[in-house]
Image (cartoon, coloured by chain):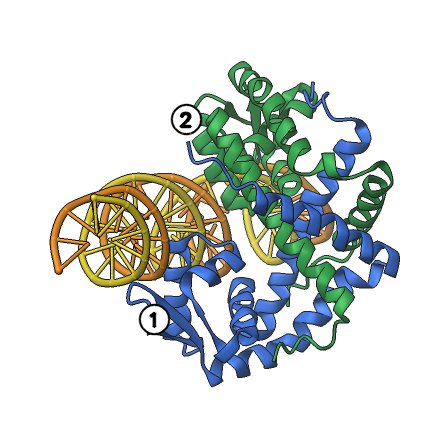
Chain colours: A blue, B green, C orange, D yellow
Amino acid sequence: MSDERSLSPAELAAWRAVVESSQRLLTRIEGELREQSDLSLADYHVLVRLSEAPDRRLRMGDLAAKLIFAPSRLTYHIGTMEKRGLVIRQPCPEDRRGSEAVLTDAGLAALRAAAPEHLRSVRRHFLDEVDEADLAALTRIFTRTDERLTAAPAESR
Amino acid sequence: MSDERSLSPAELAAWRAVVESSQRLLTRIEGELREQSDLSLADYHVLVRLSEAPDRRLRMGDLAAKLIFAPSRLTYHIGTMEKRGLVIRQPCPEDRRGSEAVLTDAGLAALRAAAPEHLRSVRRHFLDEVDEADLAALTRIFTRTDERLTAAPAESR
DNA sequence: GCGCAGTTGTTCAGATTTGAAATAAGCGGT
DNA sequence: ACCGCTTATTTCAAATCTGAACAACTGCGC
């Protein structure tokens, strides 16, 4: 009765495994991050992206794209992080429509404090089980998927 | 300045590819599903699980576990689906604490109507790029991950 | 220069999600 | 039959997320 007949059993198994397992994995990893750090996974990702950016700052739009956040979500999210002192918002000098999120020292410290345990979680629950060949396969598969998705933007009807 | 030094570059690349790409993939696939069907991806997953269940019905708790939903989320979600006539809720005969979600004919019809296009999306954006060997690798990797996660439940302090 | 289509962020209202506490039963011993 | 403890689900309030509408600004073509 499943009506998924147009995928082969192998395809169905793979698709379900990816969707469910990545869901469960991220739920677990986020739970552990929260236990140890007062940061959500989204907070963490914001901090990582800003820490990697030149001058520790990014335009809202660029940051949203990297995080796969809807614009209004990022506005809200940066707002909560600003209240906690992890980032500040500054008007963008070159384009007065825009604003930039800037990582504070406290934000960087929070990231540095959280990273080791978080990365341990990632290892423990995922990477430790994946050998080098599989790692390369994952990178190749998902990088290609991502490239195609980015290349073929969603239709906006 | 990334402070992710405890993962090798290959590990980091793989982890990021998996997290971001699966995120982007699901966002896109959900968007297409919504365009074509009035169903969210969560709706769709509920319908699939119920359609596979004996007698098209499942205990709330079992369904929540399969969907990786917090209990209160499932209560709310089934509520919205009930309003749309896709499922009904019935008290569980064997255990009067419990209740069951039951797929209606309309729910099954909605699933059948949505499935072909949805599965085409899944193929187009993901499965078509993955050869048989990679498919097997994905299944193996994520199934194992999932088993370990399920086996080692989150600590509840 | 001017007008105006397109971009960038924000705001707002409403939908969804979460987590803690409440509710309602089951279950084993007494 | 009556505790006291566990389990299943719901309720409730607060946090988060989404999409549509908006305000400010850019930069192109005239």
- Measured as percent of width and height from the top left, residue A137 is found at 81, 52
- Measured as percent of width and height from the top left, residue A108 is found at 53, 81
Q: Which residue is painted at 55% across and 66% down in the image?
A: A45
Mark 2 is surrounded, within 10 Å at the Cα level, by few (under 14), some (14 to 19) or many (20 or more) other residues, namely few
Q: Circle 2 sits in a helix, a strand or a loop, which is it?
A: helix
> Which of A88/A93 is in front?
A93
Q: Are marks 1 and 2 in contact (CB under 8 Å)?
A: no
Viewer-nearest of discs 1 and 2: 1
Is the residue B45 above or below the residue A83 in the image?
A: above
- Specify whether B110 is left or right of A86: right
Instruction: Classify residue A117 by image quadrant.
Output: bottom right
User: Could you give the CA–CA distance between mark 1 and mark 2, rounded to whole angstroms?
Assistant: 50 Å
Q: Which residue is painted at 64% across and 68% down in the image?
A: B157
The subunit carrying tag 1 is A
Is the residue A57 above or below the residue C9 in the image?
A: below
- Specify whether B27 is left or right of A4: left
Look at label 2 and name its amino acid.
Answer: Lys
Q: Circle 1 sits in a helix, a strand or a loop, which is it?
A: loop
Position of the N terminus of chain B by quadrant:
bottom right
Query: Is residue B42 something that shows in the picture?
Result: no
- Specify whether A95 is left or right of D15: left
Which label sits on residue B83? 2
- Measured as percent of width and height from the top left, residue B38 is found at 46, 27
- Measured as percent of width and height from the top left, residue B30 is found at 54, 37
Q: Which residue is painted at 64% across and 48% down in the image?
A: A147
The residue wearing badge 1 is: A94
> Which of B6/B2 is in front?
B2
- How many numbered markers are drawn? 2
